[in-house]
Each structure stands twice: as structure tokens, then as C-alpha cells.
Image (tube, rainbow, N blue to C red):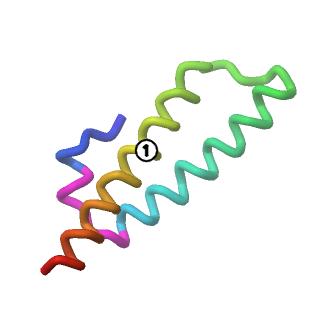
Amino acid sequence: MAKAEELRAKSADQLQEELVALKKEQFNMRFQRASGQLENTARVRQVRRDIARIKTVLGAKASEAKNA
């Protein structure tokens, strides 16, 4: 699980790459759940929250850059 402090230290490009990777993982887990192959169901929640965390940090960085 990524912490907000760790995410703030990364650049916007790094955050975008991580966001894409998490979205792909979420997509794959959705298919695994539908076919009954998903083993770690807690990971779905964790990925969803990590995506939200990254989006929050990206939004903060964007508004920070806009105001600067």
C-alpha cells in the first residue's frame, strides 16, 4: 500500500505510470472475480484506495502548479 507521503515525493509522471499499472491490475482482478479465480479479495479494496490516493495527490499537484 502506498502512503500519501511517498506519493507526494514522486513526480507527476511517476504517479501517472503507477496509476496506469493499478488500473490494469484492477481490470484484471475484475475478470478474476467474475470467473471465480480471485484469491486475494482484500487486494481489490487496497488497489481501489491506492488509485484514489494517487488521484488526490495528482489533483493537489495540479492545483499547486496552477496557483504558482
| Side of 57 relative to 5 (left or right) | right
Q: Residue at (43%, 44%) from the top-left corner?
A: 52
Measuring from the top left, give residue 45's x and y in whole percent.
52, 27
Residue 18 rendering spot, x and y as whole percentages: 44, 57
Q: Is most of the magenta stretch helix, strand or loop? A: helix
Q: Where is mark 1, residue-wise? A: 52
Q: Is residue 47 above or below residue 57?
A: above
Residue 43 occupies which quadrant of the picture? top right
Q: Which residues are magenta?
A: 7-13
Given the current orientation, which residue lies at the most extreme front position? 67
Q: Which residue is the extreme one toward the right?
A: 35
Which residue is at 13% across, 80% downward? 68
Q: Amino acid at mark 1?
A: Ala
Secondary element type, mark 1: helix
Residue at image location 26% in from the left, 52% down from the top:
7
Q: Can you say which quadrant of the picture contains the N terminus? A: top left
